[in-house]
Amino acid sequence: MFEHVKEYAGDPILGLKDKFVADTKADKVNLGVGVYYDEDGKLPVLECVQTAEQRIANPISPRPYLPMAGFAGHRKGCQELLFGKDAQVLQEGRVATIATIGGSGALRVGAEFIHEWFPQSKCYVSDPTWGNHIAIFEHSDVEVGKYPYYDKATNSVKFDEMVSFLQTLNKHDVVLLHPCCHNPTGMDLSKEQWDKVLEVIQKHELIPFMDIAYQGFGEDMESDVYAIRKAVDMGLTLFVSNSFSKNLSLYGERVGGLSVVCPTAKEADIVFGQLTFTARRIYSSPPSHGGRIVDIVMNDEKLHEQWVGEVYAMRDRIKAMRLKLKSVLEAKVPNRDFDYLTRQNGMFSFTGLTPEQVERLQTEFGVYMISNSRMCVAGLNVNNIDYVANAMAEVLKEDA
Ligand code: LMR
């Protein structure tokens, strides 16, 4: 019956965890998946989330089906975070938002919508991008292309090439962008560069699809959505997928949102209906627990403020790890430039290690990063950073 079914090679990010768990080395360190661990190497439960959980548990309430679009408070939370509490575009009713199963669910529903209503459109992703971007769009039968983004030689964005390439795209092609904390490189566009990219998008009538999974981990909550708000100010029509996995540390709850900014409130209503229909055809309606937490934390002023502080504490710890790693590596491998470590934002650093060096780190030292050389800086802490830096120095030295 299943002889024709092909074997699944496994996921380069999520599959690495199994290898890590099976590794018996005492000093092993997981810098693979994009997950924030605290100073003790533990996955935190944010205090604002703990308060929300207590409210949910007392009293324990019945669990009806949610609306296909999820809780209204979850949707409002996404909208205000992305577009601003008093944003005109929200008052005008021009944003169609549904709660989704994580950021991945938002991408999937968005990709299905593009496939159905813009069947001629191709989707262009940065080279490189998060591998699942390509898989999700292709699985929805949207053809995927790549635009130039990262220059390994200089550890910076190939900005001129990127802009020239975007100018060659066809009307209504989709451009998938990371508003902050680019995954996997950590290298973001400056505000001036965003202005230029959006100008090209407007001129060529392209559709921006902004995927934001790390709001608050870059500069701050507001600066990290600069590109989204600028696009709205310019009157662009755009898609935004957002995730609460990282900034609420709710990975397993799968909470996110998909927002489509439309030219008119009438179109937003119609788009909203189609988004709910798409959700209905894939998973019917979202689960309630994570959505309830989002609703409580985002819509309670005090908890929201506490949450922002907790996100900034995570952001600052990651930045401190970047500085520390840079200084240790500079001392150990003086002939190599590690400046990129502090120029990158968010959880990730593209280290420029070869696949062989990444493999050696794994087999000899039990230090796990993605084979494309992406390291999750949020997995470093004061107890493991010297060990990781030593291991990196070893594999880099032999190569020098
Ligand atoms: C990552 O990039 O490591 C995370 O977004 C987790 C994932 O699903 O790949």
Image (cartoon, rainbow, N blue to C red):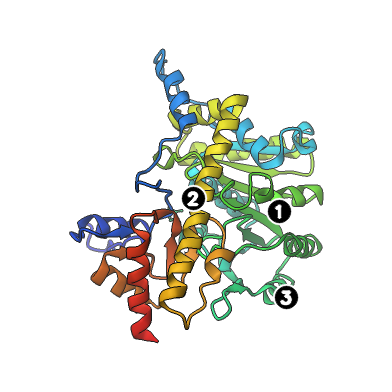
- Alpha carbons under labels 3 and 1: distance apart: 19 Å
Disc 3 target residue: 164
- Structural crowding at the residue carrying mark 2, measured as other residues with C-alpha within 10 Å and reported as few (<14), some (14–19) or many (≥20): some
- Alpha carbons under labels 2 and 3: distance apart: 37 Å
> Residue shown at 59%/65% (left/top)?
343
The answer to whether residue 217 shows anywhere in this view is yes
Question: Where's residue 313, x and y in %?
Answer: 52, 43
- Where does ligand 1 appear, by image quarter? bottom left
Amino acid tagged 2: Arg
> Residue shown at 46%/71% (left/top)?
351
Disc 2 target residue: 317
Label 1 C-beta lies within 8 Å of the nearest ligand 1 atom: no
- Alpha carbons under labels 2 and 1: distance apart: 25 Å
40 sits left or right of 352 in the view: left
**For marks 2 and 1 on the same chain, the one whose residue lies earlier in the sequence:** 1
**For marks 3 and 1 on the same chain, the one whose residue lies earlier in the sequence:** 3
> Residue shown at 26%/68% (left/top)?
365
- Structural crowding at the residue carrying mark 3, measured as other residues with C-alpha within 10 Å and reported as few (<14), some (14–19) or many (≥20): some
Q: Quadrant of the N terminus?
A: bottom left
Q: Point out the residue furthest to the front here.
A: 331
Q: Point out the residue furthest to the left here.
A: 24
Name which quarter of the figure residue 387 lies in. bottom left
Question: Where's residue 223, x and y in %?
Answer: 68, 49
* Cβ atoms under marks 3 and 1 closer than 8 Å: no
Q: Secondary structure at mark 2?
A: helix
Disc 1 target residue: 227
In terms of depth relative to the viewer, which is nearer, 357 or 90? 357
Relative to 116, does residue 153 appear above or below in the rendering?
below
In terms of depth relative to the viewer, which is nearer, 181 or 210? 181
Relative to 44, does residue 58 appear above or below in the rendering?
above
Amino acid tagged 1: Ala
